[in-house]
Amino acid sequence: MTPNPILKVLFILKKYRVKCLLIGGQACIIYGAAEFSRDSDFIILSTDKNLKCLQEALGALNAKLIYVPPLEAGYLKRGHACHFRCAAKDVEGLRIDVISKLRGCETFNKLWERKKTVSLKSGRTIDVIGLKDLIQSKKTQRDKDWLMLKRLVENDIILNKYNPANDRVKWWFRECRDAGILIKLAEEYSRIAKVCVRKRPLLSLAVISDIEKLNLQLHDEEMLERQKDIEYWTPLKKELEILRSNYVKKGLRKSELSR
Amino acid sequence: MKYEKIMKKLEVMYSVTGFIDEDMEWLSFTPARRILETTKLWKFYVALGGSLDPEPDSQSPFYFKEIPR
């Protein structure tokens, strides 16, 4: 196996001209998260042409579908993810998850316009979802995503602490989830903080340094987003259960899941 | 930006965020360097027989039992 199977997957997708962006844990690493992610997640453009390219790339990786739904534009457009496991040399066992819609995020084409391209010394490039969109995609029902989201925003504050553009500071005020940091930011950028209160009223507590109430409201804000994510996934999970049940009952052909 | 300059910046923030030294060093890397460093981890991980299965996460909508092929 080559040292980094993720890179191999990325290069194969590029080779087959699959229009996709790296998301999930691998994207977080690129933006400074100190974690070790063992799978690869992509958001893809769900056109017939692009799905054909993806099928070819998956073929080259000897990747098989391991769960419902099948790789079809209709499912992807409704928000489902398709899950594969590679069997080719150098990537054996690696999971690839693809999705074409992220809750709360813009369309693929908008995400593509805002993507980050990382250039490697080899001259190859990796297309990654933009940081702001990555943060948005992390507002899920999972604890680990919220920990990651917080850390990514803090990373950005640390790396751009000196002379940040006003828009960047506004974004920090919109996305930072640490009461202590918000209070410090409000002290440093009081004018911008007051402007941002209109869109995020809890910032008024940062302006007056009320850390206790601010922590409570940050918690409520997070719970609300988590609930929205649960509600978003509930019908999709029901649909998956039906698909899985049909698959088991009818004993669909093996090719149904392995194409 | 030079490594030393970034490290100095990061040191200023150290007490604010509670970041540890390793975090700060990691942050000082470029995205491309982070990918290369991860590659080194993969080498060890695979050599030690590490699993490529995602970590079990019951909160994830993607947490499921695979359908046998």
Image (cartoon, rainbow, N blue to C red):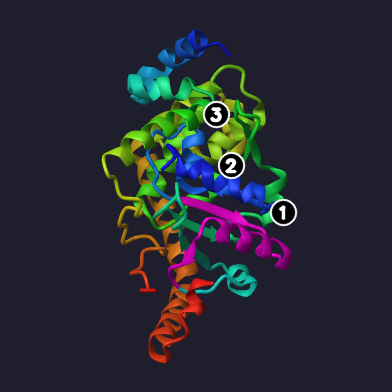
Label 2 is placed on what type of residue?
Lys
Residue bearing the label numbered 1: A109
Q: Nearer the viewer, residue A229 or A41?
A: A41
Callout 3: chain: B
- Crowding around mark 3 (Cα neighbors within 10 Å: few <14, some 14 to 19, many 20+) is some
Same chain for the residues at labels 1 and 3, yes or no? no
Numbered badge on residue A132: 2
Q: Residue at x 40, y 35 (%)?
A: A179
Q: Is residue B56 left or right of residue A256?
A: left
For residue B23, which quarter of the picture?
Answer: top left
Does the segment drawn in magenta span residue A154? no
Does the segment drawn in magenta span residue A58? yes
Q: Answer yes or no: do the residues labelled 3 and 2 have beta carbons within 8 Å? A: no
Q: Nearer the viewer, residue A136 or A217?
A: A136
Q: Of helix, strand and loop, which one carries label 2?
A: helix
Same chain for the residues at labels 3 and 2, yes or no? no
Callout 2: chain: A
Q: Answer yes or no: do the residues labelled 1 and 3 have beta carbons within 8 Å? A: no
- Mark 2 and mark 1: Cα distance apart in space: 15 Å
Q: Nearer the viewer, residue A230 or A130?
A: A130
Label 1 is placed on what type of residue?
Asn
Residue bearing the label numbered 3: B32
Which residues fall within the magenta stretch? A40-67
Numbered badge on residue A238: none
Q: Is residue A51 left or right of residue A90?
A: right
In the rendering, at what x and y percent does residue B39 appear? 43, 33
The mark nearer the N terminus, 2 or 1, is 1
Does residue B50 sit above or below A253 in this rendering? above
Residue lying farthest to the left in this orientation: B48
In the rendering, at what x and y percent does residue A220 appear? 39, 52
Q: Residue at x 43, y 13 (%)?
A: B12
- Crowding around mark 1 (Cα neighbors within 10 Å: few <14, some 14 to 19, many 20+) is few
